[in-house]
Amino acid sequence: METWDAIRARRNVRGYSHDRIAREDLERILQAGWRAPSSMNWQPWHFVVVTDPEVLEALSTTGPGTGHVATSAATVAMVAYHPEDDVHARWLQYDFGQATASMMVTAADLGIGSGHASVRDQHEVRTVLSLPDDTVCPYMVAFGYPAGRPLRPVEHPDRRPFQEVVHWGSW
């Protein structure tokens, strides 16, 4: 798939087939996150890859909107050490967003669906993944082949009108 097609085909997928994702495809997705831009090249992320169905089930209860994690072929937990101050906390959110977007577009390029989720229960996610106490896992990204309809470029996306969003030169 071409980059523009992958961007247009990417959508949040929360229903997955039972097909496994090849390790080389998972590694390509993870490399996209690893290569993502980062504030001051800080690279705060650690990616915990989960494919075990029992662990995926446990992760699916760590926040509202995490239920799709249980049926994913793989989920990546986005983990970092607690930010030292508010500036680094903001950088962390932005950097995780860039890594997430890079992984999701790469997955779409491979025909793999993805759905992001926020983690609310930090104690539970630390317990399930054996994370150190000085870490935080604000997000997870679930991956799997879409059940029902495969990824393909969306011709008419459900978005605010382009002209309402884009401002040239000034507001």
Image (cartoon, rainbow, N blue to C red):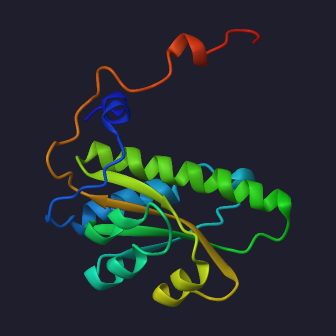
Return the residue nearer the eye: 45 or 116. Answer: 116
Nearest to the observer: residue 99 or residue 127: 127
Q: Is residue 26 above or below residue 61?
A: above
Residue 43 at what x, y percent from top left?
64, 62
Q: Is residue 129 above or below residue 64?
A: below
**Which quadrant, please, contains the C terminus?**
top right
Place of residue 27 in the rendered image (x, y in percent of width and height, measured from the top left): 34, 64
| Corner quadrant of residue 5 | top left
In the displayed structure, does residue 169 sit left or right of residue 29? right
Compared across the picture, whether 48 is left or right of 29 comes to right
User: Which residue does the image show at 17% across and 67% down from the upper left?
Assistant: 20
Which residue is depicted at the point 67% across and 88% down? 133
Where does residue 90 sit, x and y in percent of width and height?
76, 55
- The location of residue 169, given as percent across then percent down, is 74, 9
Please say whether residue 36 is visible from this viewpoint: no
Picture quarter with the N terminus: top left
